[in-house]
Image: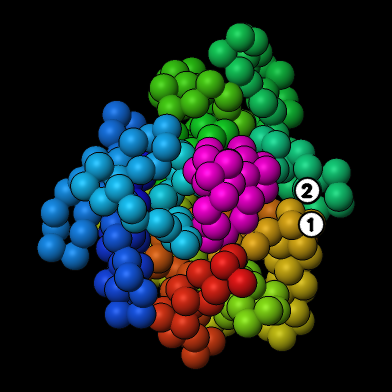
Amino acid sequence: MGGYSHEYEISLKSGMVVYKILKEHYNCYRILIKENNWSLIDENDNISTIDKESFEVADHPNLVFDCIFNAIHGTPGEDGKMQKYFSDKNIPITGCNSYQSELTFDKVKCLNFLSSKGIKVAPSVTISKTNKPNLNEIEEKVGFPCFVKASNSGSSFGVYKVYNSDEMKNCLVSAFEVDNKILVESHIDGREFSIGVISFNGEKKVLPITEIITSNDFFDYEAKYEGKAEEITPAKISTELESKLNLLSKDIYELLELRGFSRSEFIVNSSGIYYLETNTVPGLTSESILPQQAKCANIDLKDLFINAIEEVIN
């Protein structure tokens, strides 16, 4: 829990939900990950330092970990770094492996990969700090309004909706404070849907679909975490659209070779279904979208979390 990104506090909330549920079934410890130090917190809230090189706990030299439950949103839990670290230590970690984590966390790489497999995505331009953006070319390809997105970021940090060139300049500066690579993507008008796909009891399972209706300009941080959006689960859609979305989201799960939890976002309009992104460490509080979907599918959080552990240790 924790991490190095703007999603630190959100990760703490997810981690505490997981800990409170799993401590009734396993011998659990909270591991707090910060950039400058890692620490273990026991059931009595005693804190022990963890050596980052060896993953040994100062006050518990004989402690051996059977599994790590990953509840870190953003880096290093969602971008492959934690997955590689624990793979090198031969300690199982919930969710997908390092390559899939790195691929899905990088919006540009993931969109390029899925687009090459025939998945419909919005027109976009990629900008890095080393190549100066040509605003005229960007406007010609993606138009206004459009989105400026930090490529490696979550919870809509570093994401801006832009209406003109002047806003574009300012938003690019802000986005580059979050990441060195920026995705400028066309705004696709339509209905927004979030779909959880999980591996559960040995099968890939598509959860009930959520429609997101926000009072903000888009589904930004405020809309996600401060109640500025309506999340309707199950979505009120036709059987035909439900079937198409279920099939597409499962196909994407398989194309990306994911494991554990995932939540993918789509925009639907008269031109078709547009893929936006996939989150492989989605929010895990009871108010978060994926747990809401699991509840709608009659899957308890306890069963969801235990299955995630059993999946990687068996």
Residue at screen point 75% across, 79% down = 243
Secondary structure of the residue carrying numbered label 2: helix
Where is residue 11? Give x, y as percent: 34, 52
Please determine whether, in this image, residue 204 is positioned above or below residue 78. Answer: below
Q: Is residue 289 left or right of residue 116?
A: left
Where is residue 114? Give x, y as percent: 78, 48
Please determine whether, in this image, residue 19 is positioned above or below residue 222. Answer: below
Q: Which residue is mark 2?
A: 114
Q: Quadrant of the C terminus?
A: bottom right
Other-residue count near label 2 (Cα within 10 Å), few / some / many at <14 / 14–19 / ≥20: some
Q: Is residue 132 magenta?
A: no
Q: Is residue 52 left or right of residue 259?
A: left
> Residue 218 versus residue 132: which sits nearer the camera?
132
Please determine whether, in this image, residue 154 is positioned above or below residue 158. Answer: below
Residue at screen point 59% across, 65% down = 312
Q: Which mark is residue 255?
A: 1
Question: Which residues are drawn in magenta?
Answer: 80-106
Q: Quadrant of residue 256?
A: bottom right
Res 42 visible = yes
Q: Amino acid at mark 1?
A: Leu
> Residue 231 versus residue 167: which sits nearer the camera?
231
- Whether residues under marks 2 and 1 lie with C-beta atoms below 8 angstroms apart, the answer is yes
Q: Which mark is residue 209?
A: none
Q: Is residue 82 magenta?
A: yes
Q: Quadrant of residue 58?
A: top left
- Alpha-carbon span between mark 2 and mark 1: 8 Å
Residue at screen point 80% across, 53% down = 119
Q: Amino acid at mark 2?
A: Leu
Where is residue 198? Give x, y as percent: 61, 71
